Image: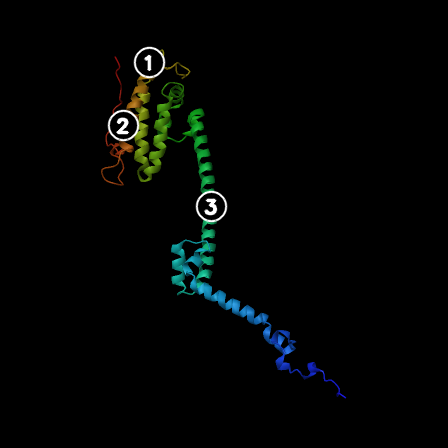
């Protein structure tokens, strides 16, 4: 009688089982699984290696600066890329502050220029609408007298009279140290102009009121003023022979000036 049959599967050794049919143990699974922390560290190292391979200038240019700035900042940071980035950030902040300041200054200058232009326009308007008031205090106007000045401002000579008054104000400002000589010169022009004024009739009555000024004499006065204005402009607006000197036209005279008359006959 045959003995009991043994189960062959029980006699099979573990080593004889193909590896792909074995049951993986917990320890083996742990060994085969990748550690997330280690994987991240490896990735970071690879990234650092890639960055080291990249041109630092190109990395800095990516911050939005020119190649020249990138080179200067990298050199200033002694080749330290991180330090160079910080320097670039500071550089950009400084540039922004400078641009903002320049913008504010430009706006302020524009506002000041607009205000100055507004005053100039107002002055130009007042010169022509109320010249006697605007040029009050000018030696030329004071020596003309109210009647002659009013007649000139109502004639074709108005613009030339205003030009002379305007030039007197400028000259007294330009040559402050010789303001007296400048005022004296303009007063002499006015005296010459008044000396050539002729009135209708005898030139006055018992009440002391003057008759009307002759139109022909106003033409004479106008011609005289135009001649003096031309001489003034040539003397004042030309460069002096010796820098810083006052034009010779304002030199004081020691003798009493003669009354200038113009004969148009």
**Circle 1 sits in a helix, a strand or a loop, which is it?**
helix
Residue holding disc 3: 103
Looking at marks 1 and 3 on the same chain, the residue that comes earlier in the sequence is marked by 3
In the rendered image, residue 32, in percent from the top left (x then y), is placed at 59, 74
Quadrant holding the C terminus = top left
Looking at marks 1 and 2 on the same chain, the residue that comes earlier in the sequence is marked by 1
In the rendered image, residue 186, in percent from the top left (x then y), is placed at 32, 29
The local crowd at label 3, few if under 14, some if 14 to 19, many if 20 or more residues have their Cα within 10 Å, is few
- Residue 182, image quadrant: top left
Viewer-nearest residue: 83 or 265: 83
**Circle 2 sits in a helix, a strand or a loop, which is it?**
helix
Q: Are marks 1 and 2 in contact (CB under 8 Å)?
A: no
**Circle 3 sits in a helix, a strand or a loop, which is it?**
helix
In this rendering, position of residue 188 left or right of residue 13: left
In the rendered image, residue 61, in percent from the top left (x then y), is placed at 43, 56
The local crowd at label 1, few if under 14, some if 14 to 19, many if 20 or more residues have their Cα within 10 Å, is few
- The residue shown at (44%, 27%) is 125
Label number found at residue 231: 2
- The residue shown at (49%, 67%) is 46
- Residue 146, image quadrant: top left
Viewer-nearest residue: 66 or 114: 66
Label number found at residue 89: none
Q: CA distance from mark 1 to mark 2?
A: 23 Å
Quadrant holding the N terminus = bottom right
Q: CA distance from mark 1 to mark 3?
A: 60 Å
Figure colour scheme: rainbow
Residue holding disc 1: 216
- Of badges 1 and 3, nearer the viewer stands 3
- Of badges 2 and 3, nearer the viewer stands 3
The local crowd at label 2, few if under 14, some if 14 to 19, many if 20 or more residues have their Cα within 10 Å, is few
């Amino acid at each position: 009688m045959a003995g009991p049959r043994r189960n062959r599967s029980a006699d099979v050794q573990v080593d004889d089982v193909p590896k792909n049919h074995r049951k993986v143990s917990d320890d083996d699974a742990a060994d085969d699984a990748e550690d997330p922390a280690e994987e991240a560290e490896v990735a970071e190292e690879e990234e650092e290696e890639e960055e080291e391979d990249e041109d630092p200038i190109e990395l800095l240019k990516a911050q939005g600066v020119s190649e020249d700035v990138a080179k200067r900042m990298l050199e200033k940071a002694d080749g330290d890329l991180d330090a160079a980035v910080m320097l670039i950030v500071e550089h950009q902040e400084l540039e922004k502050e400078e641009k903002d300041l320049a913008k504010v200054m430009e706006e302020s200058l524009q506002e000041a220029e607009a205000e100055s232009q507004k005053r100039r326009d107002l002055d130009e308007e007042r010169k022509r609408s109320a010249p006697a008031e605007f040029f009050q205090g000018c030696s030329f106007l004071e020596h003309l007298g109210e009647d002659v000045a009013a007649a000139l401002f109502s004639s074709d000579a108005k613009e030339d009279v205003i030009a002379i008054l305007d030039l007197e104000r400028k000259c007294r400002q330009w040559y402050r140290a010789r303001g007296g000589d400048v005022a004296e010169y303009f007063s002499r022009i006015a005296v010459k102009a008044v000396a050539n004024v002729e009135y209708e009739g005898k030139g006055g009555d018992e009440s002391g009121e003057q008759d009307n000024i002759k139109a022909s004499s106003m033409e004479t006065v106008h011609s005289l003023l135009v001649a003096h204005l031309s001489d003034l402009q040539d003397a004042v607006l030309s460069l002096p022979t010796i820098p810083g000197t006052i034009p010779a036209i304002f030199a004081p005279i020691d003798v009493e000036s003669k009354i200038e008359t113009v004969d148009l006959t």
